[in-house]
Amino acid sequence: MATPVLHLALIPGAGMGHLRPFLRYARLLVHHQYCRVTLITSHPTLTLEESELISSFCSALPQVNHIQFHLPPVDAATAKVTDPFWLQFEAIRLSDHLLSPLLSSISPPLSAVISDMILTFCLLPITESLCLPNYILFTTSARMLSFLSCFPAVHGSKSSASSASFDGEVLEIPGILPIPKSSISPFLLDPNSRFANIFMEDSLKVPKLNGFLVNTFKELEGQTMEALNGGKVVKGLPPIFSVGPLLPCEFERKDQLGTTLKWLDGQPEGSVVYVCFGSKAAMKRDQIRELGDGLMRSGSRFLWVLKDKPVDRDEEEELDEVVGDDLKESMKKQGLVVSKWVDQGDILGHKAVGGFISHCGWNSITEAAYNGVPILAWPQHGDQKLNSEIVVMSGLGIWMKSWGWGGKALVKGEEIGEAIKEMMGDESLRLKAAEVKEAARKAIGVGGNSEVTFKTLIDEWKK
Ligand code: BUP
């Protein structure tokens, strides 16, 4: 058996949406004959789900060297953020003094570090001082990477490396479809927000990194990838590699009883709308009730992952407390509502699922693309409107732009019901989604773009 000649450290950020692609990529690497992998995670994790997932990953892949670093406590007032996920990011960003000795003491010495973009601020000076190549596993879209690279233009900074311009309404980035102001998170438009400051700092660091691995594929974002790599977005960017779609793995499975899958087994093919807004977004109760009403009005069967808390969910929570007694009773006849973690990868791959109401977190989009499931986009915050634009551009789904950001204005059940009918009844959408599915499978199949990129990266790291 060949001895590994590469030692790669993977350092994810916080939240399931960031952790999962790292673990999926780590699994690919560890199965390569030349690779040894060290996974470096922060402790404690923000959610129980993350710590359980890390344990399950380590049990499934004991050859991975797992190291934890202990986070300092961070005060919300000092950090000027209240969102628990951003507080966790802040704590990680304040841990540079721990990461430097940790990285330099790893044995055998590292060949490269693959880290989350959110850590760049504290990690890049360390990797530079240790002369370690630093690659980013970018957990969202290439479109979002273009936006990040040009972010100073949003706040009026001119740069000779980029001719991106913002006229107050639209961000024009050469080579990619313009980004309307309405798609940019309000936090990032406020020059004084902590988020905008972090983006500004990170944007300036993008050219200093050794490369970006993006969980995307040619047929989904080929034009944007070409613009990024062709120097159109910003001159002098490092190489950007498409490595996706990164697929759900066995170690991610949580629903050992297969409750949701058993329910899906009893439903006709393509008949079920799957509803999930990711691991972070929690809808307000009045919007949850309207969504329940909309699902009922659509006439479709549904599987709804209901979440009204931003961090871990309380599985004991009573549905009637959230949606009310009447709606709870009528919903039982038409769908299944769960308030616990489900195995989304399996659900999207089930033949009964014919549509997906999604917040458009990037992992969810790539998982839907891989399974050819049409999406009704309902972005809630962050990068999700930019991602929704890709859903529409690729033909994978539809987006009711008038609904705006989730939580801003109440979207009524009637409208939701009509939008669901549109998604579920559109045969051309179904066919287009099936084409995206074929392209996704081709990308990671033998000789596909992402598969070839994987080998290219291994060769690059071996040099
Ligand atoms: Br909720 C939920 N089961 O019950 P996104 C999510 N997931 O498997 P987010 C489950 O978590 P960010 C559940 O398949 C996806 O891989 C889902 O990531 C899985 O959204 C992941 O879609 C969620 O990127 O993260 O959680 O909002 O904001 O970082 O994109």
Image (tube, helix red, strand yellow):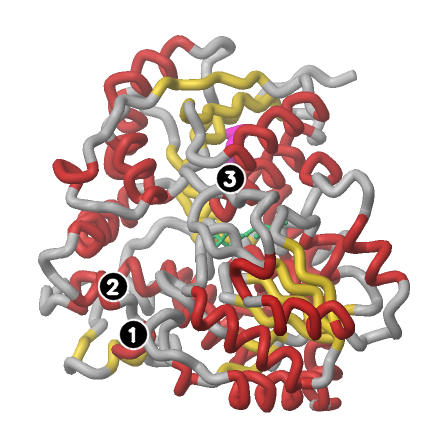
Q: Which mark is residue 19?
A: 3
Residue 46 in picture, x, y percent from top left: 42, 34
Q: Amino acid at mark 1?
A: Ile
Instruction: Give the SS element for disc 1.
Output: loop
Above or below: residue 66 compared with residue 357: above
Q: Which residues are magenta?
A: 459-463
Q: Which mark is residue 450?
A: none
Q: Measuring from the top left, give residue 218's x and y in whole percent.
A: 58, 65
Residue 173 shows which numbered tag?
A: 1
Comparing 238 with 350, the one in front is: 350
Disc with the residue nearer the chain's start (1 vs 2): 2
Q: Which mark is residue 150?
A: 2
Category of crowding for the residue at label 2, using alpha-carbon neighbours closer than 10 angstroms: few (below 14), some (14–19), many (at least 20): many
Most prominent secondary structure in the magenta stretch? helix
- How far from the left and from the top, in percent, is residue 304? 64, 64
Asked if the beta carbon under badge 2 is closer than 8 A to the nearest atom of ligand 1, the reply is no
Question: Is residue 373 among the parts visible in the rendering?
Answer: no
Q: Is residue 56 magenta?
A: no
Q: CA distance from mark 1 to mark 2?
A: 8 Å
